Image (spheres, coloured by chain):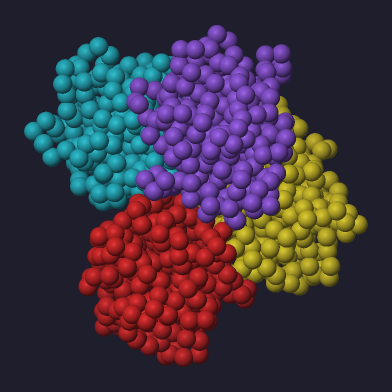
Chain colours: A yellow, B purple, C cyan, D red
Amino acid sequence: MCRWIAYRGETIALEHYVTAPARSLIAQSIHALESTASTHGDGFGLGWYGDHPEPGLYREVRPAWSDENLRYLCRHIRSHLFFAHVRSSTGTPITRPNCHPFACGRWLFMHNGFIGDWSRIRRRVEGLIPDELYGSRSGTTDSEAVFLAMLGAGLDRDPVGAAARTLAAITEMCREDGRSDAMRFTAAVANGRDLYAFRYAANDQPNTLYYRASGQDVVAVSEPLDEDRSGWVAVPPDHMVVARAGRPPEVVPFTVTRAMAAE
Amino acid sequence: MCRWIAYRGETIALEHYVTAPARSLIAQSIHALESTASTHGDGFGLGWYGDHPEPGLYREVRPAWSDENLRYLCRHIRSHLFFAHVRSSTGTPITRPNCHPFACGRWLFMHNGFIGDWSRIRRRVEGLIPDELYGSRSGTTDSEAVFLAMLGAGLDRDPVGAAARTLAAITEMCREDGRSDAMRFTAAVANGRDLYAFRYAANDQPNTLYYRASGQDVVAVSEPLDEDRSGWVAVPPDHMVVARAGRPPEVVPFTVTRAMAAE
Amino acid sequence: MCRWIAYRGETIALEHYVTAPARSLIAQSIHALESTASTHGDGFGLGWYGDHPEPGLYREVRPAWSDENLRYLCRHIRSHLFFAHVRSSTGTPITRPNCHPFACGRWLFMHNGFIGDWSRIRRRVEGLIPDELYGSRSGTTDSEAVFLAMLGAGLDRDPVGAAARTLAAITEMCREDGRSDAMRFTAAVANGRDLYAFRYAANDQPNTLYYRASGQDVVAVSEPLDEDRSGWVAVPPDHMVVARAGRPPEVVPFTVTRAMAAE
Amino acid sequence: MCRWIAYRGETIALEHYVTAPARSLIAQSIHALESTASTHGDGFGLGWYGDHPEPGLYREVRPAWSDENLRYLCRHIRSHLFFAHVRSSTGTPITRPNCHPFACGRWLFMHNGFIGDWSRIRRRVEGLIPDELYGSRSGTTDSEAVFLAMLGAGLDRDPVGAAARTLAAITEMCREDGRSDAMRFTAAVANGRDLYAFRYAANDQPNTLYYRASGQDVVAVSEPLDEDRSGWVAVPPDHMVVARAGRPPEVVPFTVTRAMAAE
């Protein structure tokens, strides 16, 4: 289980959400409240968009709470759309390529959850990645494989459909493997303009997802960043936050089974 | 606050105490029970004696719980006297030279506690290190400085006296700095033959120290390694465990003030 | 291109070959003579056999030349069969799981060379790894994939045949991919009793392999460890060093094409 | 011996000088031409000024050439004044706090050279650091000690004089220690507005320093970043580059002995 935040809005310094709040992501790295893991010390990462069409990335295997580079970067880097993630590994090694977010072209992706009995279904999930993207697989996580599969399923032209189709296929693989409950996907994906945050599980217990919006600014999180719960809205299961460029964020249903039927 | 274990006895694989027990040091690294810090993810270290007169050392800045090298080493390295330590930093950087144990010549040292308002009294404590040992100061912790000061105070010829004189001097420095409560020292030191474990504080709240003995075998720990509390004996404040070569361990008073008066 | 040494013989401290010689592996890490890469600073690793049936492993992403842990371990760990490797990456990330040697069960493997246009033929080579071993793939290198494919091809019962069959299959894949020259394999594999060191390339330019023997002791290396060239024997292309338990080492032909024809 | 660059001018992406040129600092990290060390793989660092009054810092113990974070940061961070440094250690440990640049308040500092027989004169040099700055000493290098001593000698109000007084004092310490040749100082210091780059040695063999200027833009380097030598000007020994805010850079004498006489 991991903790993450995704921001889309006015250009601000990353510290505003990553390090400053009372229950900032960095505070959650050493003591989270709504996670099955209290400690998220298995690496971390930042991804952000600036002037360059492709996002920036900073990932490190050490815990976020003691990384002095992270504090400097969060103070100095400003962005209108950024991701931050602290990891609690479900088994894959603690390496930089296994830390979130993942970047490919102009896309960023990060994930809280897990996918099936990974050592058993891994090869089948990797089979969803098209040949031309397989060279971009630099780590070994379930999360990176899902991201590359989503890219192969058409993330560029139909982000929501690509996610739904990919998750439908993997949910089916898990079912065939006898682990129909073993698929949790609370994730965010962005292309520098638009942000999508999903809350899905193959059973009825998806991991938590909250958001807080103000005008066109929105921040989506695994758990609230402060004790003022009034501002944070829980996203219902099988729903998603959509924040398209120039439009306020909205919460809409995210239906994986419908996508399955449609194929 | 840190967690540590020190072993002296029959030659065994390090895994016997470091990784295998229900509440092994590695388990404590992610969730300790008797520490002010629950998580000890700010680096770790092993020190052990073998055929070579000087000890071996393995120190790393990553958390112990996810270090695969540590598991291999604990399975393969066998020793009659070894230390293991997981760190929760009180402020000094997370670097290998700041991880415990510290080695100098044939001596090993590790520490749980802290010393005064370190940034203020640091230079005075470093002043206790003789010139010929100052080149051995490779980190910036209070712990390493105390160790080198103890070496300078005669650790080779009078280990208990050297510790008492050093702590008396530092306790006095803290008192002069207006922080007479700010000196906690639950530490172990060894030379390949003899093991000494101390429980001292400038006030009446020293950090915990337990031990378990069987014949000439003894293991001293910050907190018990399993739930069978019957086997673990709490060392009283101002006492120490002494395990000299070829003799069973014993618990004796450790009096810092007497040493002060004697100077 | 990487540099490595493999030793089988009397039990000795690893430092004897890894850190002490004039042109030790550590010296080669910062300045090699017979490699296309002068510097091998992209991680390193040790693998060794002791009392435990499975080998020990120490791998690190930092350069070998400045790793103080490595010096302590080489001084303290003694073994009758060990591997050491310094890496110069051909493109895959610098992570511990991508460092050599690789371990699986009682086997150790390490490699100098490269395999085809890896991002293009990777998926096909990974297809040679049987399902039951695919969960052991913890990195992304060509080398680890070849090792797991060799295990799947019967390394346990027929080490030389398993290597020849695997290399024949991969050589054919490279040929089909239009890179018939792009397969170099100077590698060592061991099971705790027997050591095999191979020198093969798909074209006529295999990377160098030398050995030095004395009675049943043998050390195989990418390049000599000292300037006394008289003691070092170059292994011819398409040959291998075989050092089976209780027998002196011998150099024999290693024929990949014959294995291809036999399939 | 280290390699570094310092830039002051129009706001640009760091990649323009750090990663892009034919003989960029990253290229020099694996193969430098004018250094006593060919390889500079003992850590690296970036320091830069942005909107915040204090500089940003990114330092890492791994070699610069394989750090994917560094490439992302150099592409995304833009600055009007930045430092970059690749390290070849002269003996102090490879830790982040020992990597250049060093930051304190609004100042940045980096250094190529060494100071005396460091383990012998270290304590005396540290004695030049005033008490109120000693808590800022987070590493153990000679370079950081000189920087803090310069701050203590009045860097804020008289940068050139503070440098000269500090170097005069240390040169004298080296002389007293019998190593009158052992002091080399090719260094840069900046406060977010002004940049100073020094070329000094206690003997007549200071390390190289070059610069290239265009209008108010200036880049100072240990060795040229490309083969077009015509654009690079060698700074003479005992001279410095001064680039004050709003003024073009100039090369002026830097006289340490005069400062000594003046004290």
Task: Let me know if residue D43 appears in the view.
Answer: yes
Looking at this view, name the residue that lies furthest to the top: B215
Q: Is residue C224 above or below residue B5?
A: below
Residue that protrudes farthest toward the front in the picture? B262
Q: Is A220 drawn above or below residue C94 in the view shown?
A: below
| Residue B189 shows up from this direction | no
Q: Residue B10, percent across and down? A: 48, 13
Q: Closer to the camera, C116 or C101?
A: C101
Q: Position of residue A93 (x, y in %)?
A: 55, 38
To which quarter of the image does residue A39 belong? top right
Q: Is residue A76 left or right of residue C152?
A: right
Between C6 and B88, the one lying in front of the other is B88
Counting from the top left corner in percent of width and height, residue B118 is at 60, 51
Q: Residue at x 24, y 38 (%)?
A: C24
Task: Report the quarter where the N terminus of chain A lies.
Answer: top right
Q: What residue do we see at 49% from left, 64% from top?
A: D129
Position of residue D112 measured from the top left corner of the image (x, y, whole percent): 35, 66
Compared to residue D90, the image places residue B19 above or below, namely: above
**Image point (84%, 46%), residue name:** A237
Q: In the image, B230: left or right of C63?
A: right
> In which quarter of the view is residue B57 placed?
top left
Left/right placement of residue D66 relative to residue D225 reads right
Q: Residue A184 or C214: which is nearer the viewer?
A: C214
